[in-house]
């Protein structure tokens, strides 16, 4: 058993550093928050952490060897809006087709130390209510996570340029 563990450790050490993939996802903490998007700074921070953690996990599983990615979440506008004038529903986010999720971010993709893509982008999906994976989810950030997953697949995994 020990010899198998030692052999595995040696094999991992023998791999070149460029064969590994690394992803770093961070969020920019601002002093203010949008009261229409979040009820409190704590809610905002928790949502940013949750989105960053989900994207980090996804990238750790899917990045090809030799590719390093750095993503910074700058601003998140969750799908839907609070409608405080509805009595008894002050804390309910109402989803409509005119209130899609919107995420501003900055990213950089490196392959073997060379920058192959870098940009600031605003990502949104006007058809978010039609996405079956997020529609059937009970996750409070399902639409935002689906948006980031689709974006990461296109931009960071497949390296497709943004459409203008």
Image (cartoon, grey):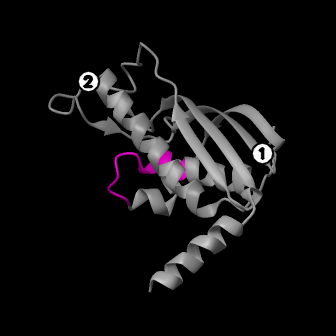
* Element carrying mark 2: loop
Q: Which quarter of the rendering shows the C terminus?
A: top right
Q: Is residue 109 magenta?
A: no
Q: Which quarter of the rendering shows the N terminus?
A: bottom left
Residue corresponding to mark 1: 110
**Can see residue 41?**
yes
Q: Which residues are magenta?
A: 137-147
Q: Is residue 5 left or right of residue 83?
A: right
Residue corresponding to mark 2: 84
Category of crowding for the residue at label 1, using alpha-carbon neighbours closer than 10 angstroms: few (below 14), some (14–19), many (at least 20): some
Q: Give the quadrant of residue 21.
A: bottom right
The x, y position of residue 160, in whole percent, is: 80, 51
* Residue at 75%, 62% in the rendered image: 16
Labels 1 and 2: the sequence-earlier one: 2
**Can see residue 125?**
no
The x, y position of residue 78, in whole percent, is: 45, 35
* Element carrying mark 1: strand
Q: Give the quadrant of residue 74.
A: top right
Q: Residue furthest top?
A: 31
* Residue at 14%, 32% in the rendered image: 88
**Residue 63, placed above or below residue 54:** below
Name the residue nearer the viewer: 21 or 154. 21
Q: CA distance from mark 1 to mark 2?
A: 45 Å
Name the residue nearer the viewer: 135 or 103. 103
């Amino acid at each position: 058993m020990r010899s198998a563990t030692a052999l595995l450790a040696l094999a991992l050490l023998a791999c070149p550093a460029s064969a590994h993939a690394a992803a770093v996802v961070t969020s920019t903490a601002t002093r203010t928050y949008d009261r229409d998007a979040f009820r409190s700074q704590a809610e905002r921070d928790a949502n940013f952490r949750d989105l960053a953690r989900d994207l980090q996990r996804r990238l750790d599983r899917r990045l090809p060897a030799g590719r390093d990615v750095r993503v910074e979440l700058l601003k998140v506008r969750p799908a839907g809006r609070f409608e405080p004038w509805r009595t008894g529903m002050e804390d309910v986010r109402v989803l409509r087709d005119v209130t899609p999720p919107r995420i501003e971010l900055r990213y950089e993709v490196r392959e073997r130390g060379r920058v192959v893509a870098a940009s600031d982008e605003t990502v949104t999906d006007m058809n978010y209510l039609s996405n079956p994976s997020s529609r059937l989810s009970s996750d409070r950030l399902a639409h935002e996570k689906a948006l980031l997953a689709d974006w990461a697949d296109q931009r960071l995994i497949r390296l497709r340029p943004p459409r203008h």
